[in-house]
Amino acid sequence: MLYKTVVGINKQLNKLITIPFPQLEMGADSVANAGALMASKNAKKVLIVTDAMVHSLGLTASLCESLKAQGIEFVIYDEVKPNPTIANVAIGADLFKEQGCNAIIAIGGGSPIDCAKAIGAKIVRDKPVRRLAGKLKIRKKLPPFMAIPTTAGTGSEATVAAVVSDPSAREKFAIVDPAILPDFALIDPKLMVGLPKPITAATGMDALTHAVESFIGTYHTPLTDKYATQATERIFSYLTTAFEDGNHLEAREQMAIASYEAGCAFTRAYVGYVHAFAHQLGGMYNIPHGLANAVLLPKVLSLLKPHCEERLALLAEVIGLSTAEEFIEAVSNLNTQLEIPTSFPELKEDEIPLITQRALAEAHGTYPVPGYLIQQQGEALLTQFLEQS
């Protein structure tokens, strides 16, 4: 009863919160427009937030050239971890201030984008990062902010949330506020060409998880259904092509669109148990978020099927199938095609109760899940992912 009451209150609050859309710039070579867009916001010196791999691959080069063409200075912070930490956020915020920056650009996967959001939040609120966790704690406009994804999965360029890791507690927390939505979402599929197969697979399944969980949850609306179904159709049509041929520009572009659409859906309709468990696995073992979602998704859907069979059947129709069971099987088959593993080697049996407790606390306090799971069910779910000896 308490869970239903909390969800009901959250649903009413959700209706009262207006979530804007970022200004969308999309297409091959669109990164060349980054400088002009930031100049329109009076950017003088930009903190570029990225990770070492993105920087070393030269994916920041065209962005830097675009800024130089507009006379905009920049400083690069490329130390973001795959699961961005409290320290990453604090260091980035200090660098922004020390270097006299007045704008932020995130370029990379969901980790740099989430880190940049949290950096912006800390800049305007000037509090310890952990105290920014929760909903509507920011409520102040961030410096001019652009997000440039280099993977097609997180949709973070379209969302009002940032997930940060606390290594000392071995857990993750979220900052949720429309104030941290980027001003610009610049999606250039050329930045995704040649992405390694494992990253293509995991991030693509991350996008599918966003679409599916937003569709089966109880906050869904006609608008979020539209985005979620479009994203689902694109992912089933193009993800395996992008996986098999990393240079296929159309597949990369369609997956980038799908990621954005799924982001638009879940930032309004939220996610569910897949994310709740994935966040805990990421916090405990540093498992990449997209990979955790991919492994969990078909098993969680099977567990929830009695509570959302009709909605899953509608998703089945989107991809040319008929039943909820067929849709779940299609998700499992897609994982197989993408060489997604079926277990978590890092998972320790004696830590399953704690992981489950934390996941259920996250889900039941925030997410509009279609059915209610108890501790025993959560532990049984995770036990399926222990590496078989």
Image: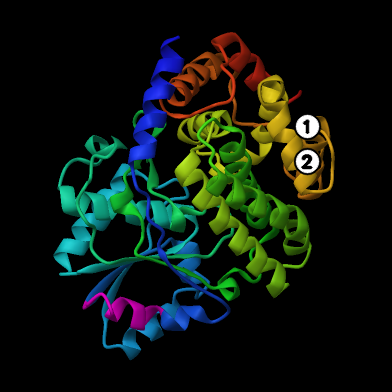
The local crowd at label 2, few if under 14, some if 14 to 19, many if 20 or more residues have their Cα within 10 Å, is many
Residue drawn at (82%, 33%), measured in percent from left and top?
323
**Would residue 153 appear left or right of 174 to someone viewing this image?**
right
| Location of residue 11 by image quarter | top left
**Is residue 347 found inside the magenta-colored segment of the image?**
no
Question: Disc 1 designates what residue?
Answer: 324
**229 or 191: which is nearer to us?**
229
Q: Quadrant of the C terminus?
A: top right
Q: Which range is magenta?
A: 34-44
Q: Position of residue 38 (x, y in %)?
A: 31, 76
Q: What kind of residue is marked 2? A: Ala
Residue drawn at (66%, 57%), measured in percent from left and top?
200
| Location of residue 249 by image quarter | bottom right
Residue 383 shows in this picture: yes
Local SS, label 1: helix
Q: What kind of residue is marked 1? A: Ala
Residue drawn at (22%, 35%), measured in percent from left and top?
131
Q: Position of residue 161 (x, y in %)?
A: 39, 45
Q: Is residue 275 above or below residue 193?
A: above
Marker count (numbered): 2
